[in-house]
Amino acid sequence: MATPKELYYEKRGQILVKNLQSRHFEACYCKNKEQALEKALEWIPEGATVGWGGAQSCHEIGLIQALNSGNYRALDRDKCRTEEEKLQCAKDAMTADVFLTGANGLSLDGEMVNIDGTGNRVAAIIYGPASVIVVAGMNKVMDTLEAAVERARTVAAPMNKQRFANVTPCGVTGICADCKNEGCICNHIVITRHCRPVGRIKFILVGEELGF
């Protein structure tokens, strides 16, 4: 029997799927990580070149591991040995067949918010790869766009910053200070409100808490 949280996520997920489709995104709802992984692999043809950036949710559903062990050309920066190799890998991802990402915030009416330090992730979402797959836990979904932006700034960014060594106010306190620090990861805030060409950006909404 479904729990109250599962029912809550599923009902909101079905609303969001319809609203994303009305904006010409492709979208589906999966109850758990296992279903999400299966769906993602359906959308990635074997032999495809696949890149990603800031894809914590993709790691959590097992997608990155599946790509690294399967018949794909996985552009995995974590396997690069030097900073130069990592930079080239990020550039190669800009023209990949498929680009994977999470979302820092989603509004229930179908708009996506992402926040970046260097911008490679949001750049690939906007233009370049033939297909973009967004894996997003339902914890990312807020009632309004304004709330989704606030979530990206005050929840996703400070949480994500804990992975990095360079010091910023949010890295120290866990609270956004609207800083201009050299190590700031809030340099690019992008709202994606519509998909062109139709279906290029695909959403897998997952009825679990994923990512930052």
Image: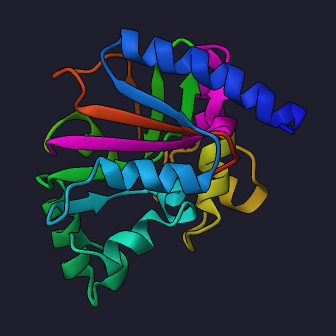
* 74 is higher (above) or lower (below) than 205: below
Residue, x 56% and y 32% (percent of image)?
Answer: 105
Residue 1 sits inside the magenta stretch? no
Query: 140 or 153: nearer the eye?
Result: 140
Query: 12 or 168: nearer the eye?
Result: 12
Residue, x 20% and y 20% (percent of image)?
Answer: 198
The quadrant of the rendering that contains the N terminus is: top right
| Residue 210 position within the rendered picture, expressed as x and y whole percent measured from the top left | 64, 51
* 121 is higher (above) or lower (below) than 75: above
Q: Say whether residue 81 is visible.
A: yes
Question: Which region shows up in magenta?
Answer: 129-153
Residue 73 occupies quadrant: bottom left
| Residue 188 position within the rendered picture, expressed as x and y whole percent measured from the top left | 39, 38
Q: Is residue 133 left or right of residue 186?
A: left
In the displayed orientation, state which residue is furthest to the front.
Answer: 1
Residue, x 20% and y 80% (percent of image)?
Answer: 85
| Residue 133 position within the rendered picture, expressed as x and y whole percent measured from the top left | 34, 43
Residue 93 occupies quadrant: bottom left
Q: How is the image coloured?
A: rainbow
Q: Say whether residue 118 is visible.
A: no
Query: 168 or 68: nearer the eye?
Result: 68
Q: How many marks?
A: 0
Residue, x 47% and y 31% (percent of image)?
Answer: 28
In the displayed orientation, state which residue is furthest to the bottom.
Answer: 81
Q: Is residue 117 left or right of residue 16?
A: left
| Residue 31 position within the rendered picture, expressed as x and y whole percent measured from the top left | 64, 41
